[in-house]
């Protein structure tokens, strides 16, 4: 099969222009990995089963007939439908594998066997193959279906998320899938670099559980080094204080005082003599006395509004931020007056979307093409 680069991906000057990525994945982590490749200029073809990517129906909300969830991670790719259980469709997909530079898939071990995915990979051992799995292959969880919520639960992430005396809580966005998708993109780019150095194609496995556990970072390392099991601290930090919310007269404000010098500046800005007491000079002391320190700070900050304190702190050198909802985040000057939000085509019409956060030589790449209808490009790609 000849894989012609789509016109929307020609002449872009982007780093991955000319790279062919076959996306056999569905839901979030795999499609996010493939979308990152498309954002960077790769020519991506997504293969959906006749049943469609389940994320198309994860709604509300919807835009047109598709869930906005689908729109979030499926731009920059053509879309074909193939049933790998049918010999003709299997051969169509195998022909794409033979000329692909990268393949991204997230089949379970049992699906790999039943659909003969290894047979597809055997068609092109030189390509970079990225397998996103529930957990590392060979382990007892490797063939159990998993999703972001389950990964957050099993990983320990929920164990450190939530208020001290409340049940564990998930993070409000699908952070497990996102972290896994980003590791998938790292794997893809590493493999492409290896190929550019005349090394053979590599098979990368990106397990959802272990990728999510890697997001524990300091919490995990603290446990592994000391054996002390981290607990939920609400919005407080286990190792830094004050590092969390304070109450103002009309809401909350976040302080992130990471050094003793920053705390000294906070004391000067606030001007409350209670904060000059010696027992809060060092971070170790502030962490040990965080409850009393929080009480004093709340008594000070509740005397003025959040906006008033933001004005006071703006040029103080004290790290701080307002606590915004999603609408507020998009309304702040940095985002509203910048180019992070753009527009893209979709089956339901033109829709606003977040562009890639990356800038290349000071320029943020455009969204060249939005998500496609299911099977919209089947005839042009397969010729049938």
Image: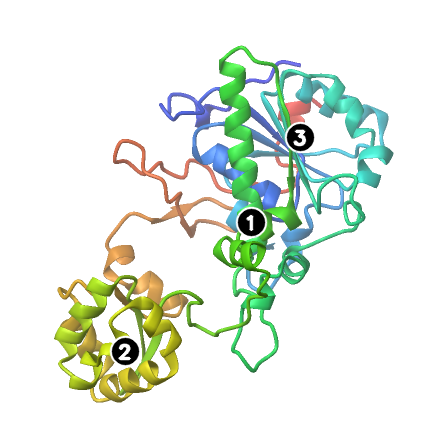
Q: Which of 29 and 11 is in front in this view?
A: 29
Mark 1 vs mark 3, CA separation in Å = 38 Å
* Residue beneath disc 3: 378
The earlier-in-sequence mark between 2 and 3 is 2
Q: Do the residues labelled 2 and 3 touch (CB within 8 Å)?
A: no
Query: Does residue 140 appear in the picture of this structure?
Result: yes
Number of other residues with Cα within 10 Å of mark 2, as a class: few under 14, some 14 to 19, many 20 or more: few
Residue at disc 1, secondary structure: helix
Residue positioned 53% across, 10% down in the render = 198
Mark 2 vs mark 3, CA separation in Å = 69 Å
For residue 356, above or below residue 201: below
Name the colour scheme: rainbow
* Residue beneath disc 1: 214
The quadrant the N terminus occupies is: top right
* Residue beneath disc 2: 279
Question: Does 124 sit left or right of 32 as displayed?
Answer: right
Q: Nearer the viewer, residue 184 or 260?
A: 260
């Amino acid at each position: 099969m000849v894989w012609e680069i789509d016109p929307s991906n020609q002449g872009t000057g982007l780093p991955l222009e000319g790279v062919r990525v076959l996306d056999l994945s569905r839901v979030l982590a795999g499609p996010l990995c493939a979308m990152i490749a498309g954002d960077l200029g790769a020519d991506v073809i997504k293969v959906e089963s006749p049943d469609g990517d389940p994320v198309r129906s994860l709604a509300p909300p919807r835009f047109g007939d598709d869930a906005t969830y689908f729109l979030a991670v499926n731009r920059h790719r053509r879309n074909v439908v193939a049933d790998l259980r049918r010999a003709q469709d299997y051969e169509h997909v195998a022909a794409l594998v033979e000329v692909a530079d990268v393949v991204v898939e997230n089949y379970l071990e049992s699906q790999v066997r039943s659909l003969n995915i290894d047979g597809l990979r055997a068609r092109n051992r030189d390509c970079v193959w990225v397998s996103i799995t529930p957990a590392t292959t060979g382990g007892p969880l490797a063939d159990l279906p998993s999703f972001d919520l389950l990964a957050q639960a099993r990983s320990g992430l929920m164990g450190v998320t939530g208020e001290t005396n409340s049940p564990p809580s998930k993070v409000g966005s699908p952070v497990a899938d996102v972290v896994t998708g980003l590791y998938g993109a790292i794997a893809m780019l590493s493999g492409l670099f290896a190929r550019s150095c005349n090394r053979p194609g590599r098979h990368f496995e990106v397990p959802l559980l272990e990728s999510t556990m890697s997001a524990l970072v300091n919490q995990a390392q603290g446990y592994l080094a000391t054996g002390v099991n981290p607990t939920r601290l609400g919005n407080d930090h286990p190792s830094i204080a004050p590092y969390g919310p304070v109450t103002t007269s009309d809401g909350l404000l976040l302080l992130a005082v990471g050094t003793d010098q920053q705390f000294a500046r906070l004391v000067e800005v606030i001007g409350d003599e209670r904060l000059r007491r010696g027992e809060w000079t060092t971070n170790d002391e502030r962490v040990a006395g965080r409850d009393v320190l929080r009480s004093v700070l709340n008594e000070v900050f509740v005397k003025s509004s959040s906006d008033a304190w933001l004005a006071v702190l703006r040029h103080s050198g004290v790290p701080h931020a307002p606590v915004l909802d999603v609408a507020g985040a998009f309304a702040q000057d940095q985002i509203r007056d910048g180019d992070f939000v753009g527009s893209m085509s979709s089956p339901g019409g033109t829709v606003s979307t977040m562009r890639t956060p990356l800038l290349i030589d000071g320029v943020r790449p455009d969204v060249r093409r939005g998500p496609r209808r299911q099977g919209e490009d089947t005839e042009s790609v397969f010729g049938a």
